Image (cartoon, rainbow, N blue to C red):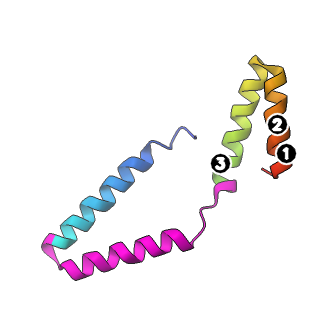
Amino acid sequence: MPNWYPLTRYVIIVKYVLLTAILIIIDWKFAIGLFVVGFILSTIIPIPYRILYKKTFRKKVEKIKSFYPQEGQMFTEMLDKTGF
């Protein structure tokens, strides 16, 4: 995973803290509606993984290739076959 990936845990925590605050301060129906809409959107809208992870995977494979050339070549071929 990319170096910034652990930050996504904090984003998730902040999301639920904000939903809890909305639940307590504004209205429980609004909070549940936001939760459901967010859930539906996260399942419908695709994550642009190719854009986000393509460079990261290639860099990791190059690093592996510098230490273990044969395994690195195998990973490069795997990524090439998948179009990644």
Residue holding disc 3: 53
SS state under label 2: helix
Q: Earlier in the sequence, mark 2 or mark 3?
A: 3
Disc 1 is placed on an element classified as helix
Residue 74 % position (x, y): 83, 32
Q: Is residue 72 magenta?
A: no
The residue drawn where x is 84% and y is 22% is 70
Q: Which tag is nearer the camera, tag 2 or tag 3? A: 2
Residue at numbered disc 1: 80
Q: Quadrant of residue 56?
A: top right
Circle 2/circle 3 CB separation < 8 Å: no
Q: At x 60% / y 67%, what residue is drawn? A: 46
Distance from the alpha carbon under mark 3 to that under mark 1: 14 Å
Q: Residue reaching furthest top?
A: 67
Mark 1 or mark 3, which is nearer the start of the sequence? Answer: 3
Amino acid type, mark 3: Tyr
Q: Secondary structure at mark 3?
A: helix
Mark 2 surroundings: few (<14), some (14-19) or many (≥20) residues within 10 A: some
Q: Quadrant of the N terminus?
A: top right
Q: List the residue tagged with mark 2.
A: 76
- Residue lying at 84% horizontally and 30% vertically, measured from the top left: 73
Circle on res. 43:
none
Q: What's the CA distance linking mark 2 and mark 1? A: 6 Å
Query: Which x, y percent locates residue 55?
Result: 70, 44
Residue at 19% across, 78% down: 28
Q: Which amino acid, by three-letter code, is at mark 1?
A: Asp
Q: Which residues are magenta?
A: 24-50
Q: Residues within 10 Å of mark 1 (few under 14, many from 20)?
A: few
State if disc 1 and disc 2 touch (CB < 8 Å): yes
